[in-house]
Image (cartoon, rainbow, N blue to C red):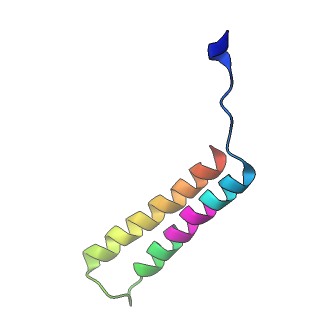
Amino acid sequence: MEGDKPKPGDCISCRIVGTGTFATVGGYALWQSRAVAPGTPMQKRVMAGVGVGMLIASVFRWYK
């Protein structure tokens, strides 16, 4: 059957670059949510949420 062909996966360099990008952006967003960074407390909470979300995405990117 032709429908049973496995899908090709990402190459290792694509996984490394994708995971590194998500992790770097997540770390930067968390760094922007620190107490001494400019912005309102609500903006800092949003940035913290974005940072955590990006770090979680980097884990999913590596294993999927």
Q: For the image shown, how many numbered marks are present on the structure?
A: 0
- Seen from the viewer's position, the closer of residues 49 and 24 is 24
Residue 9, position as x, y percentages in the image: 68, 39
Q: Quadrant of the N terminus?
A: top right
Most extreme residue toward the bottom, as rendered? 36
- Seen from the viewer's position, the closer of residues 9 and 57 is 9
| Residue 20 covered by magenta stretch | yes
Indicate left or right for 24 with 35 as reference.
Answer: right
Q: Is residue 24 above or below residue 58?
A: below
- Seen from the viewer's position, the closer of residues 58 and 18 is 18
Q: Is residue 14 above or below residue 3?
A: below
Residue at (62, 43) in percent of width and height: 64
Most extreme residue toward the top, as rendered? 1
| Residue 53 covered by magenta stretch | no
Residue 17, position as x, y percentages in the image: 65, 61
- Seen from the viewer's position, the closer of residues 1 and 55 is 1
Boundaries of the magenta span: 19-25
Residue at (68, 34) in percent of width and height: 8
Most extreme residue toward the front, as rendered? 2
Residue 61, position as x, y percentages in the image: 59, 51
Residue at (44, 73) in percent of width and height: 29
Indicate left or right for 23 with 47 as reference.
Answer: right
Label the magenta part by its dominant secondary structure. helix
Q: Is residue 6 above or below residue 10?
A: above
Residue at (52, 54) in percent of width and height: 57
